[in-house]
Amino acid sequence: MDQEKIMQLQKMMDESQNIVFFGGAGVSTESNIPDFRSTDGLYHQTYKYPPEVMVSHSFYVNHTEEFYDFYKNKMVFLDAEPNKAHLKLAELEQAGKLSAIVTQNIDGLHQKAGSKTVFELHGSVHRNYCQKCHRFYDVNYVVEADGVPYCEACHGIIKPDVVLYEEGLDSNVIQGAVNAIANADMLIIGGTSLVVYPAAGMIDYFRGKYLVVLNRDATPRDQQADLCITDPIGEVLGQITV
């Protein structure tokens, strides 16, 4: 752990009043949720179809049963608990230092840790709706269903409120996230390779003082960053005092 960089991060955060955190799958790996692109991530495992195909809208429509088999086993982690990163971000928000979290994750761990202002770019496993009558179902109903989950009221298929490949992002969520980033005086990017668009493009709206990247691997934004730290995010943020 590079203590000099931790001290530098602490100083930047102390000087900032409106911090926004932009995070990806690497934020939840310390909660034992696998990411996508690392060597032991989801995209490097072998399945009947490529994982990118199995989490696409067309696969959901044409192979609904196989979609749910993959989704329940590989994308829903109900036993996962918030790690030091989630908890510190919630603490920073409570202290009035952090104004928003913009996340590409669908696990709901930021809310479980106590964060209130969370823009979930790719949706959440915790929200599920009947495609016919739009009735709400929680994640337990979906996971416990035998195969494809059907609505109790109209027998329509229940779909997770998760943005699949080929689907667009929610415009209200995008607008909220863009506004938060545009008004921030410090932006911390954590646990994301910044290769998934349009999410990664939101960084362009940042005009504040400090840009920090906390990521194990290099990202396209490292050259612009005021500080880059490659140590685990939870371990880094766990050392920050509010």
Image (cartoon, helix red, strand yellow):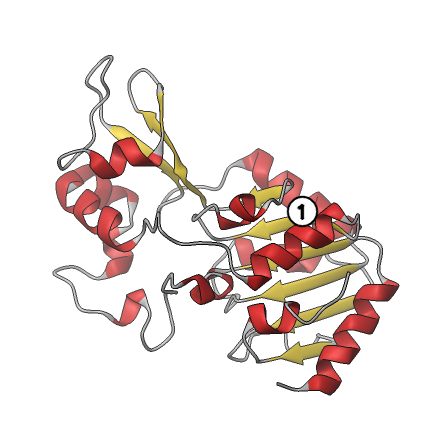
Quadrant occupied by the C terminus:
bottom right
Against 90, residue 37 (above or below) is below
Seen in the image, is 74 located left or right of residue 65? right
Residue situated in front as seen by the camera: 49 or 33: 33
Amino acid under label 1? Val
Whether residue 201 is visible to the viewer of this picture, yes or no, is no
Residue situated in front as seen by the camera: 102 or 219: 102
Residue 175 position by quadrant: top right
Residue hosting label 1? 178
Residue drawn at (74%, 86%), measured in percent from left and top?
4
Whether residue 153 is visible to the viewer of this picture, yes or no, is yes
Residue situated in front as seen by the camera: 236 or 133: 236
| Residue 234, position as x, y percentages in the image | 57, 68
Question: Is label 1 in a helix, a strand or a loop?
Answer: helix
Residue drawn at (14%, 37%), measured in percent from left and top?
147
Seen in the image, is 62 located left or right of residue 25? left
Taking the view exactly as shown, the residue that stands out farthest to the top is 153
Seen in the image, is 30 located left or right of residue 117? left
Quadrant occupied by the N terminus:
bottom right
Q: Residues within 10 Å of mark 1 (few under 14, many from 20)?
A: many
Q: How many tags in the picture?
A: 1
Residue drawn at (67%, 47%), measured in percent from left and top?
178
| Residue 72, position as x, y percentages in the image | 24, 47
| Residue 146, position as x, y percentages in the image | 13, 35
Residue 218 position by quadrant: bottom right
Against 156, residue 39 (above or below) is below
| Residue 155, position as x, y percentages in the image | 19, 18
Seen in the image, is 220 located left or right of residue 241? left
Taking the view exactly as shown, the residue that stands out farthest to the right is 15
